[in-house]
Image (cartoon, rainbow, N blue to C red):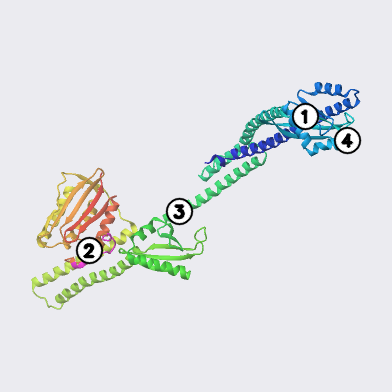
Amino acid sequence: MNRLNNVVIKLWLTIIFIVTTVLILLSAALITFIQSYFTQETENSLLEDAKQISQLVADSDNKDIAIEHSRKLIEGPVGLIIMPDKDKAQSNKNQIKKQMYEIIQTDKDYQQVFDDGKQKSEHINITVNGKQRTYVLIGYPTQHINGQSDSKYSGVFIYQDLKSIEETNNAITVIILIIAVIFLAITTVFAFFLSSRITEPLRQLQTQALKVSQGEYTQTPPVNSKDEIGELSRAFNTMSSEIRQHIEALSSSKNIRDSLINSMVEGVLGFNDKREVILSNEMARDIIHSMDEYSSEKLDQQNERTLRNKTTQFEEYEINTRYFVIIMSYIEQIQPDGRSGIVAIIRDMTNEHNLDQMKKDFIANVSHELRTPISLLQGYTESIVDGIVTEPEEIKESLSIVLDETNRLNRLVNELLNVARMDAEGLTVEKELHSIDELLEKMQQKYKQQAIDLQLEMYLNANTGGQYWLFDLDRIEQVLTNLIDNATRYTEPGDVITINYGETDTEDILYINDSGTGIAPEHLNQVFDRFYKVDTSRKRGKQGTGLGLFICKMIIEEHGGNISVKSELGVGTTFIIKLPKA
């Protein structure tokens, strides 16, 4: 910071300037007065001498002796010239007197001494030894020294060099200047001390103001006086306390607002009239970043309509297989500078949309699943009842189909009942230590014949070395059954279905892998949803209800684990089951 901008320096310089100005003016006045005084005293003294000499000469009987005595008494530091007549000047070798004679004879003012009897005093400059010198020359009239003269009066002239007066004036000037410098130095110290004392509270206020601007409100400047600066300090402390309270209130309100906004399940966006985002939560930012060009253009159009019509606008968006509703409302003043804007609420309607779609699909699927076995049951039963089928082998074959379709209906109804029971009562599992090798061997034997019938290679009994895992045997068997059944529907003759295992420090892992048709990427995030079924064009065999994987997920999560899927079209699919270790 420039030192001239310092209050202490400014106040100090101001005091010094005032004192210096006063000292200069006072010194000049004193010097002028003293010079004038000494000059005037010198002139008065010379004039008094001139009067005395004039009186002495006039009263003396022997004027020549009186004049000679006067010269002896006066001449020395003072010069004396007595002229009986203005035209008669005595010859003199003294250069100073010679020049004085010339001035007296040539100056008209001094002629008045002889003609009018007036006294005259002037400062004259003459050259002495090549240097200009100033003299005071006093002319005083007196009676005629001799009787024969053309002038009415004779003249007594006394002169004196002003050099002594100048030397005295110079000495006095030096003394005055020394005293002024001493006073100036004392004033400087006093002014600096006074300005420091005055500005110290101001510097404390400045320091505290900087701290307040940086958010520190705890320290307050001390109040050491009852003057205006003390009142200023008290006012500043009060202001700082009130600012701290207001900032804390605003900060608390902002924290509550931010917490509420960030904890909302909906996305929140705030735009000003320049379409600048001034408020958002994480969900809204993620949605905005995931928008494609069409959705972004649609959002801009909705924004423009809201600003133009100043009414609430609703729009539905489909972004990456997810569905959203954006509600925009106009705000007259959304920023402190008075700008208007928009607040947008983004609601994720994917679950609602999928639920509606699943309900529709469920009704269609269940209707289809029920209609097919019922039609078969009805047809074969009518064939037997009507006597169309009479051979024992044909009757047995028809009854076998009826039994198969009945089992299918029973399985469908059981799945629906299981889901309904899970929703109503929750899923319970009884976890115990079981040999995972025995369960996998059982699955190998269970699907041995089906692998032959479908011309698949199944390797389900991965050898874990006799490990015991913590799980509900029936529930995990149900999970593996659902996953292997699904694998058989999405494979072709010659494909392979395998079960492998792995582990971490905290988890036991099963990998159920098939080399079938795979699952498209857009379906991977939804395969575990209720009633969700992937593309049936790549599926062989009978279709299910879309509840199998949903039930698997609920069972695994009830065990405290998780299930996930990885798949690539034309390569195969892998389901990964992770269970906590005992």
Q: What's the magenta bit mostly, secondary-structure-wise?
A: loop
Callout 3: SS: helix
Q: SS at mark 4? A: loop
Reply yes or no: does residue 393 show up in magenta. no
How packed is label 4: few (under 14 Cα within 10 Å), some, or many (20 or more)?
some
Residue, disc 2: 411
Q: Which residue is mark 3?
A: 258
Few, some or many C-alpha atoms within 10 Å of disc 3 (few <14, some 14-19, many ≥20)? Answer: some
Q: Amino acid type of disc 2?
A: Arg
- Residue 540: image quadrant is bottom left
Mark 2 and mark 4 residues within 8 Å of each other at the beta carbon: no
Instruction: Residue under label 4, please give it.
Output: 152
* Image location of residue 156, percent across then percent down: 83, 30
Is the residue marked by circle 2 packed among few (<14), some (14-19), or many (20+) residues within 10 Å? few
Where is residue 349 drawn, in percent x and y? 36, 64
Task: Compare marks 4 and 1 and give the one earlier in the sequence.
Answer: 4
Q: How far is mark 3 from mark 2, CA to CA?
A: 50 Å
State which mark lies toward you, 3 or 4: 4
479 versus 241 height, above or below: below
Q: Earlier in the sequence, mark 3 or mark 2?
A: 3
> Toward the viewer: 212 or 150?
150
Determine the image quadrant of residue 535: bottom left
Percent of width and height locating residue 38 = 76, 30
In the rendered image, the vertical position of residue 431 relative to residue 312, given as above or below: above
Q: Which residues are magenta?
A: 525-537
Count of marks, rendered view: 4
Mark 2 / mark 4, whichever is N-terminal: 4
Question: Is residue 221 visible from the viewing direction of this image?
Answer: no
What numbered label is drawn on residue 159?
Answer: 1
Q: Nearer the viewer, mark 3 or mark 2?
A: 3
Q: Nearer the viewer, mark 1 or mark 2?
A: 1
